[in-house]
Image (cartoon, rainbow, N blue to C red):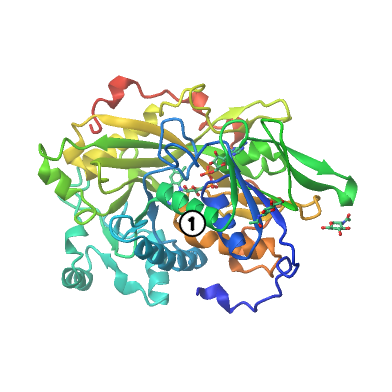
Amino acid sequence: MGVFSSQPEQPQVMTTSPVKPKVIIVGAGIFGLSTAYYLAEDGYNITIFDQHAYDSGDGYKLNPGSTAASVDENKIFRASYGDELHYQRLAYEAREIWKKWSAELGDGKELFVESGMLRVQHSTQLDALECQTLANMKAEGLRDTQYVLTNEEDVRRATKNGWAHKLLKFAIPDGKDVTFEAVLDSTAGYVYPSKACAYLADKLRKKGAEFIEGPDKGVFVSFQVEGSGPSRRITGIVTKDGNEHFADLVIMACGSATPMLVPEVSRVLEATAGSVITIHLPPREEAPQLWDKYSQEQWPVIIGHDPDPEGRTVGSRSIYSFPRTEDGLIKIGYRVTKYTNYVKLPEFSRPISVPLRPGLDDTSIPLKSIEGIKTFVSTFLPDLAALPVAVTRLCFYTDSVDNSFLIDYLPDYNDSLFICTGGSGHGAKFTPILGKHVRDVVQKKPKTDLTYRWRWRPELPLGNGLEEGPDGPRTLDKQKRASPEDLKRAGW
Ligand SMILES: Cc1cc2nc3c(=O)[nH]c(=O)nc-3n(C[C@H](O)[C@H](O)[C@H](O)COP(=O)(O)OP(=O)(O)OC[C@H]3O[C@@H](n4cnc5c(N)ncnc54)[C@H](O)[C@@H]3O)c2cc1C
Ligand SMILES: *[C@@H]1O[C@H](CO)[C@@H](O)[C@H](O)[C@H]1NC(C)=O
Ligand SMILES: *[C@@H]1O[C@H](CO)[C@@H](O)[C@H](O)[C@H]1NC(C)=O
């Protein structure tokens, strides 16, 4: 049980009726599935829709056509959140469940890998964010789990606890033999989001939840609306095949597509693209030492930054890499710039940013991203610099005005329409716990420290980049894209 379990238990508004409310959830990503999981636990009658046929063929396996953030090989698990103690606690609450689920699944099928994560600093000093993280870890009695590279006592403890080999020293380029300060978090690592989605979908099916997925039958097209004024209600949805589906409550968990499907949220949420590449190690028999070096046992997640061309450092913790996968792939993510894709849609009076349509739009990554990644590879993964980039991908975030999720009823629909998204690039780690808090909001329990942050909050000024809009510098149409030539070498 987490810190919020001290909230007094309220009578559960919706569970007292003998007939469970019928709930439609649109979106079978992390937000939709975690919500469904906890609602199903309370006996709600759930139908989940998705435009992708995750229930057939390759399931949640990553394919080049996928823009869903939850469909991915790996995502970082971290609890280091600067001064945001509420997210630190939520991450540790989630971590217990990740471990429990992994144990349940057994050897080789785990969903969570405790590889550790090295937070490389900008310079030889700890930055302000890092100092806040360490202070909050200390406040919660967890300072022991963190190892500062230049702290002798920490290095001794790392050696004793078997973490010293991951407390890596990286030379600052042209820094005259000095190394970046770094902090190794032994509680961090990564999770398998696609596997976690498949795991939850399986559990949900066993609990009797229905899945309607695939092009046409799973695609949300419109709401069914009844009444007007204060009694206006959403009574269900219409899918692309023309079928009508009815429910007491519709939950929209469509990730980066939510703003174009629910115009009311288009001011406060923005679809933005992160750039992701993978590098293939040479076959194991040709390079056994690289396979060993970059394994999860030997190598941590590394999160660093993007030195700008003038040699100053910009952005914070904005490029990251994972240990190799079982197939010898190393993934690197770039979020120094999150690109927008503004289009004019007929139903909207102003342009909104939407996810790319694979097969229809140019999904190549901007040259700027590949240049940042090359600097990162040359600095932190120099063994890989001569290898080609195997795959590139633009993966869509759903950014909110303040980087916190958006989980609440939408006003003016008499509690029949609920929004559950706004992952803002950090939702995956919370997969096992998110829905528990979503359920509290669905059941109108008093707001907690967390659910208050996730409330419908149109009054907030635009921030987190949303203030830039279509005229800002981050739109994809203003970016030069990387050519195949640019991808021939992952470094220099
Ligand atoms: C590049 C990148 C890196 C990230 N890294 C991390 C990380 O390291 N750690 C971490 O914790 N988090 C990370 N995140 C965040 C995390 O991945 C997201 O918070 C989370 O996956 C969002 O899940 P979701 O369910 O809201 O959205 P999605 O995964 O996008 O799911 C939305 C679903 O809605 C469906 N849908 C859309 N439109 C329709 C329609 N009309 N009809 C039917 N279905 C529809 C889509 O097909 C999709 O399956 C990252 C995100 C990105 C983009
Ligand atoms: C959910 O409701 C439908 C009718 O709307 C019913 O056919 C189905 O059996 C119910 N499922 C569960 C798990 O209660
Ligand atoms: C809102 O919906 C409830 C049923 O869920 C109904 O009892 C109530 O009268 C509705 N409110 C208005 C203003 O129509």
The spot of residue 164 in percent (x, y) is 18, 63
Pick the front one: 70 or 306: 70
Q: Quadrant of residue 9?
A: bottom right
**Residue 131 visible in the current orientation:** no
Q: Residue at x 23, y 62 (%)?
A: 149
Vertical relation: 391 (above or below) 61: above
Ligand 3's quadrant = bottom right
**Dot 1: within a 10 Å radius of its alpha carbon, few (fewer than 14), some, or many (20 or more) residues?**
many
- Which quadrant of the figure contains the C terminus? top left
The spot of residue 293 in percent (x, y) is 16, 49
The spot of residue 109 in percent (x, y) is 33, 55
Q: Which residue is labeled 1 in the image?
A: 431
Mark 1 C-beta closer than 8 Å to ligand 1: no
- Secondary structure at badge 1 equals helix
**Residue 229 visible in the current orientation:** yes
Pick the front one: 323 or 28: 28
Q: Residue at x 71, y 39 (%)?
A: 263
Q: Quadrant of residue 145?
A: bottom left
Name the residue type under label 1.
Thr
Q: Residue at x 18, y 31 (%)?
A: 386
Vertical relation: 144 (above or below) 355: below
The spot of residue 73 in percent (x, y) is 37, 44
Vertical relation: 358 (above or below) 321: above
Pick the front one: 432 or 93: 432
